[in-house]
Image: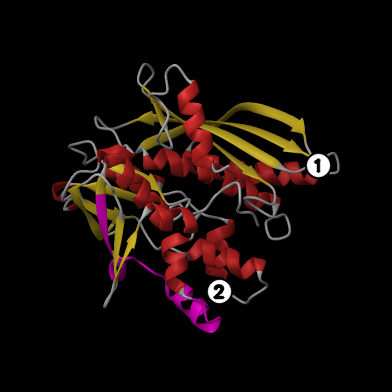
Amino acid sequence: MRELDFLNIINSKLSDNSLIGDDCAYLKEFGLFVTHDTLVEDVHFSMYTTSPYQLGIKAVNANLSDLASALAKPLYITVSISVPNTVKDLFVSELYRGINDVCSFYGIKVAGGDITSSDKIVISICALGKKVSDYLVSRSFAKKDYYIVTTGQLGNSSAGLYALMNFLYADDFLKKSHLEPQARVNEALELSKIMNSDIAGMDTSDGLIDSLYKIACASKHSIELDFNKIPVSSQLLEFSKQNNLDYKNFVLWGGEDFELVFALSEEIYEKLSDKFHLIGRVLNKDNNPSVYVNYSNSSQEITKSVFERNSFNHFKNSL
């Protein structure tokens, strides 16, 4: 059973599912956004390639990335960990050193959590952020002719993971992109200051195509993507060339970059800094949304079947 199947069941069983659908829920009564993310050993990380310190950094940033996608200012987190009885005190110490370093950088407070035993290491974080814009972000807010923009390079994290799992040489930049990703909090706050309408957006934690396809479906529009405009690092290009790999797969389908992707008006885009990159646009509304990827001499349509075949699935993918 796939994640989307579970979500459909959950939605059908809740008497009020109005807060479900985006990576963050907006609690209007309190002016707060809330998100919750869980990392499971051998599904989202491996202790053979990740240090406890790096795990702490990544776990917090995964949640901050969701808050950033909603243009929320992060305030608090709660941390719950489940660990085997064989785990040493040093693991917990290093894990929380990583958590504290990220929280200190952004001025976030840890407001409790839970500790339990389990067969594998699980770290689950709930994050709360303050609404700082008069407008909202949702997957369903994309409109015809909106620009598609992203905050940075795509594919570095998945290439770093590929190198680690296959014992391949790769520039430390790629490995660090996977092991110590950074949420785009500052870019989100920049965008929040110039908003003059609701916009669509997500982070790219499950891949660029994953984000764009979900925005297309929620908004009931198709999206056109210009592949040549997507920021790609020289390190990714070199790694792919050396190992005879197609770098386009990392760029389009690789996850955990924690970049942000938005569909917004030309007026908003013109006010953004060069941290934001124009990579596509929203097409006419239709009844069968797709993502069209345009290359130099060809084009590919990402239909539902293509998406389901290539996107990350928590119930079939693991390290």
Residue 287 position in % (x across, y down): 25, 44
Q: Tell me which residue sits at (52%, 45%) in the image.
A: 62
Q: How many marks?
A: 2
Residue 239 position in % (x across, y down): 52, 77
Q: Tell me which residue sits at (28%, 33%) in the image.
A: 136
Amino acid type, mark 2:
Asp
Rendering colour mode: secondary structure
Quarter occupied by the C terminus: bottom right
In the depicted structure, whether residue 260 falls above or below residue 240 = above
The residue pinned by badge 1 equals: 89
**Residue in the foreground of this view, choosing between 95 and 257:** 257
* Precedes in sequence: disc 1 or disc 2: 1
Q: Tell me which residue sits at (55%, 74%) in the image.
A: 171
Closer mark to the observer between disc 1 and disc 2: 2
**Residue in the foreground of this view, choosing between 96 and 278:** 278
**Residue in the foreground of this view, choosing between 219 and 112:** 219
User: Going by the image, does 29 lie left or right of 197?
Assistant: right
In the depicted structure, whether residue 145 falls above or below residue 26 = below
Whether tag 1 and tag 2 are in contact, CB under 8 A, the answer is no
Amino acid type, mark 1:
Asp
Residue 152 position in % (x across, y down): 37, 59
Give yes or no for residue 219 being in the magenta stretch: no
Quarter occupied by the N terminus: top right
The residue pinned by badge 2 equals: 171
Q: Residue furthest right?
A: 86
For marks 1 and 2, give the CA distance.
32 Å
- Kind of element beneath mark 2: loop
Q: Which residues are magenta?
A: 222-245
